[in-house]
Amino acid sequence: MWRYTRPNWGAAKEKRVDMAYPSDEYSMLGIRFRIYEDHRRGPIPRGAAPPARRGRQGRGGGECGPPSRTPSPTAEKDVMNGTNTPNASASAHVLTPARILDENGMLVGEPPQIEPERQRAMLRLMMLGRRLDQKAISLQRRGKLGTYPPLSGQEAAAVGTAYAMDAEVDHFVPQYREQLTMLHWGLPLSTYLLQRMGHPAGSALPSHGRLWPQQVALGAHLPHAVGLAWGMRLQGKPGVVLTQFGDGASNEGDFHEACNIAGVKRAPLVMVCQNNGWAISIPWHEQSAAESVALRAAGYGFPGIAVDGNDVLAVYTAVADARTRAEAGDGPTLIEARCHRLGAHSTADDPKRYRPADFDERAAGVDPIHRFRAYLVGLGQWDDTADANTIAWCDDQIATAVAEFDATPPPDPGQMLHHLYAEPDMRLRRQQEELRSSIEENR
């Protein structure tokens, strides 16, 4: 019988409610649950370990309890290896990330069938992202761009995802660190730079209508992505919806609401979480007691997959399979790409305040660009000449985009009142006139 016991908040000066022992168990759909009744057998003394509980035995004969929130001594090593689970040995419920390439670009799994030129294009886009970060940070430091979110270290998660989708029919609903996926969907690089500047021209998305605006508020775009996917299913439209986000967004309520409706409606949706282990300065084990983002999918009735996010082929394979599943009408998939973030969360962040000083140096050992380049070299598809030509191509693309960016005239302040209504009403026309008068007076 369910019984709610109101906590006695005054019982402890620390306003701590003691845990209770299990009082009964029941089974639903083959899953065992426990019903707790507060203080049935008395509170657990402070500092004392609870006695062994009845029920399923976990690894080593102990009860499978909640994972420890204390990082293991190997936690930082796990981050370097792309797993970034704080205490993987503490729970039986741990997903080992799938991988195809090791840190040196050697095969440890079955590679997907990708044409050689397409593989070279994937590496070129990854290298473009790294060079773009360097230039954009320089522009921001000179006051020409607003806050910029670097992608360095996460190129494999972005590019593997982008190339596994079909940008000709699929829709993409991005968060704020998805510049490479947006470029793959047809966004001009100069338009992206204008967007980071806050220029209205930066909102001019491609006319095909399959690339949606970036969302900076964590997780707020996820319900939109689900609604779009559900609508496409109801209308019988081809294609699926891709959305990308980070581990911080996975702890927002919007994420759980989106997962719930996506599972219920079997929305044709591919959800890719780039888990770099940090929500700005908060490590994963302080964000959630769960060992993995991907494990949450089961609670919403669809698959969750963990992959090595530093391995572009592993990401590509997982996303391609998820897209096939969504297109067949089998519903959404949650993919957790465990990667690392080189450098800062954004140009407004200083990671030296919360990460070890040698973090980036050690993370370079699992660099996704180095890994994929080594693989292509081993196949005879890449060499030093290709590397030099690609760097020159990247720099030329960026220089052309910056020139177009610099040549764009300043925006008309009156544009802030455009596109609010199909036809401006009397109040909006009055506001437009007041704004024009104010601008003239202050010239």
Image: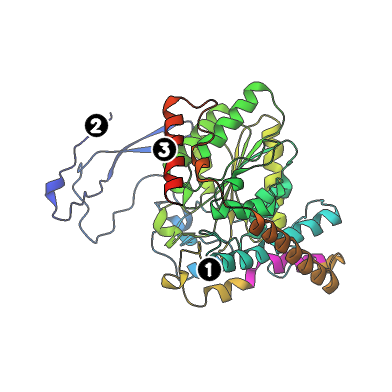
* x and y percentages locating residue 354 in the rendered image: 42, 69
Where 233 falls versus 130 (above or below)?
above
Question: Magenta residues, as a range?
Answer: 365-376
Numbered mark located on residue 434 in the image: 3
Q: Image point 59% across, 31% down: which residue?
A: 228
Is 374 a magenta residue? yes
Residue position for label 1? 141
* x and y percentages locating residue 211 in the rendered image: 65, 40
Residue position for label 2? 3
Q: Image point 56% across, 48% down: which residue?
A: 411
Q: Amino acid at mark 1?
A: Arg
Characterize the local packing of mark 3: few (<14), some (14-19) or many (20 or more) Cα atoms within 10 angstroms: few
Q: Are marks 1 and 2 in contact (CB under 8 Å)?
A: no
Q: Is residue 357 at all visible to an observer of this figure? A: yes
Q: Image point 20% across, 52% down: which residue?
A: 16
Is 98 a magenta residue? no
- Prevailing SS of the magenta stretch: helix
Frontmost of labels 1 and 2 is: 1
Quadrant in the picture for residue 342: bottom right
Q: Secondary structure at mark 2?
A: loop
Q: Secondary structure at mark 1?
A: helix
Q: Amino acid at mark 3?
A: Glu
Q: Secondary structure at mark 3?
A: helix
For the residues labelled 3 and 1, the Cα–Cα distance comes to 35 Å
Q: Nearer the viewer, residue 300 or 252?
A: 252
Please give the count of numbered marks on the rendered protein. Answer: 3
Q: Position of 36 compared to 166: left or right?
A: left
* x and y percentages locating residue 224 in the rendered image: 53, 35
For the residues labelled 1 and 2, the Cα–Cα distance comes to 59 Å
Q: Residue furthest right?
A: 380
For the residues labelled 3 and 2, the Cα–Cα distance comes to 62 Å
